[in-house]
Image (cartoon, rainbow, N blue to C red):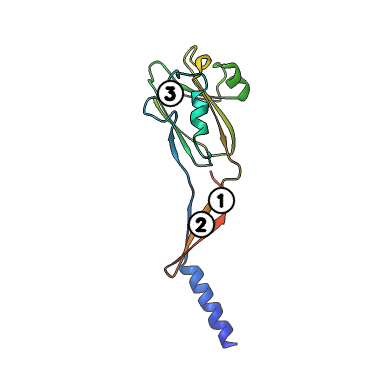
Amino acid sequence: MEVVKIWLALTCLLLVYSEAVPFCDKKELVVGGNETSWTIPLSNNSFDEWANTIDEFVQGDTLIFRYDDKTDSVLEVSKGDYEACETSRPIKEYRDGNTTIELELSGRFYFISGAAGHCQKGQKLRVHVNPDSICYVRTRTMGLFEDMPIVLPFG
């Protein structure tokens, strides 16, 4: 009986003095890959090609759009407006020249340029955020580390 009490006390002590720290492969991604790449691309699908170079987009990733705020903008739009390059009904509009958008949810997201004619010339991006994003919790118990995969909610 005494051994059980000691075991329970040690278990509680370990739980109290352990810490869990979540970590994920969240990334800050400059759209297009360089400092001022949110411009009319050389080819119509270059932003999709850039997105395909990313292993996967996960919840918590941040997209960074850098552009001339006097002549351009970033519009988050529906799939239909993305395909039609329709700029009049954005879900969100950004005009600061250094737009950061955190991908807080899983699913598909669509972005187009707000400058006249730019979307039709390929200045648009679609992103798929993996719904199965897995993070890990690193636990530290009395100086020992152990990685345990768990799914963490974001937001």
Residues at marks 2 and 1 touching, judged by CB atoms closer than 8 Å: yes
Residue pictured at 48% horizontal, 15% vertical: 118
- Name the residue that disc number 2 marks: 137
* Figure quadrant of residue 79: top right
Dot 1 alpha-carbon crowd within 10 angstroms: few under 14, some 14 to 19, many 20 or more: some
Q: Which of marks 1 and 3 is nearer the N terminus?
A: 3
* Figure quadrant of residue 66: top left
Residues at marks 3 and 2 touching, judged by CB atoms closer than 8 Å: no
The residues tagged by marks 3 and 2 sit, at their Cα atoms, a distance apart of: 35 Å
For numbered disc 2, what is the local secondary structure? strand
Please count the marks in the image: 3
The residues tagged by marks 2 and 1 sit, at their Cα atoms, a distance apart of: 9 Å
The residues tagged by marks 1 and 3 sit, at their Cα atoms, a distance apart of: 32 Å
Residue pictured at 57% horizontal, 48% vertical: 153
Q: What residue type is labelled 3?
A: Trp
Tell which residue pokes out farthest to the bottom in this image: 2
* Figure quadrant of residue 148: bottom right
- Name the residue that disc number 1 marks: 152
Q: Which amino acid does label 2 sit on?
A: Val
Q: Position of residue 93 (x, y in %)?
A: 49, 24
For numbered disc 1, what is the local secondary structure? loop
Residue pictured at 60% horizontal, 87% vertical: 1
- Name the residue that disc number 3 marks: 38
Q: Position of residue 47 (x, y in %)?
A: 49, 26
- Name the mark on residue 86: none
Nearer to me, 80 or 44: 44
Q: Earlier in the sequence, mark 3 or mark 2?
A: 3
* Left or right of 133, for residue 71: left
Tell which residue pokes out farthest to the right in this image: 80
- 117 relative to 54, above or below: above
Q: Where is residue 67 in the image (x, y as percent from the top left)?
A: 39, 23
Residue pictured at 57% horizontal, 39% vertical: 105
